[in-house]
Amino acid sequence: MSAVSKPRQISDDFNNAAAKPTTRKSKRPAPLSLRLSPVERAALEKAADGMSLSRYVKGRIFNKDGSPKPSGRAQPVRDHVALAQVLGMLGAMQAAGSFRDLAAAAKSGALPVTPETEEELINACAAVLAVKAEVMRALGYTDVEAP
């Protein structure tokens, strides 16, 4: 197998493995809908204290003591602006294609290690670390080292 067809085969294998299963699931019952006034909804959201409203209401109805089950928050993202910045950085980087090209060149022995190449690799690593730090901040982690 040539060096050019090997990455394509790997890509095809990955796409086949990542494809959604073709098994059919049984239909779920229709969701329950409840109309609330703006005041009622605001009171319910305040009582849920960040928990999803569905989980809060189900907990209040079905738990023996009337309290909702402890759970995660409805929105784990703490900083939507930071998350938007991360997504913008990812879009601008076009990293997946670049990493794929670098890996193919390295496997075929066509990647010369020059000072310029080394500098580009260091810059790529720094960019990945910056994205990681921003994602961690957006998810609410405070002890994040900046690159």
Image (cartoon, helix red, strand yellow):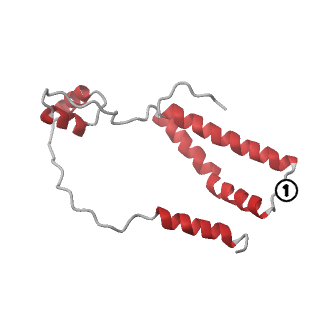
- The 10 Å Cα crowd at callout 1, few under 14, some 14 to 19, many 20 or more, is few
Instruction: Tell me which residue sits at (18%, 30%) in the image.
Output: 39
Q: Position of residue 67 (x, y in %)?
A: 18, 27
- Residue 9, horizontal then vertical, whole percent: 61, 70
Judge by depth and name the residue closer to the eye, 19 or 42: 19
| Viewport quadrant of the C terminus | top right
User: Left of 109 or right of it: where is 74?
Assistant: left
Name which quarter of the figure residue 75 lies in: top left
Q: Give the amino acid type for the residue marked by disc 1 in the picture.
A: Pro
Which residue is found at the position 31% from the left and 30% from the top? 50
Element type at mark 1? loop
Residue 56 location, quadrant = top left
On screen, 45 above or below 98?
Answer: above
Q: Position of residue 17 (x, y in %)?
A: 49, 64
Image quarter of the N terminus: bottom right
Q: Which residue in the rendered view is the most extreme toward the front?
A: 1
Disc 1: which residue:
112
Q: Nearer the viewer, residue 89 or 122?
A: 122
Q: Residue at x 74, y 42 (%)?
A: 123
Q: x%, y% of residue 95?
A: 64, 52
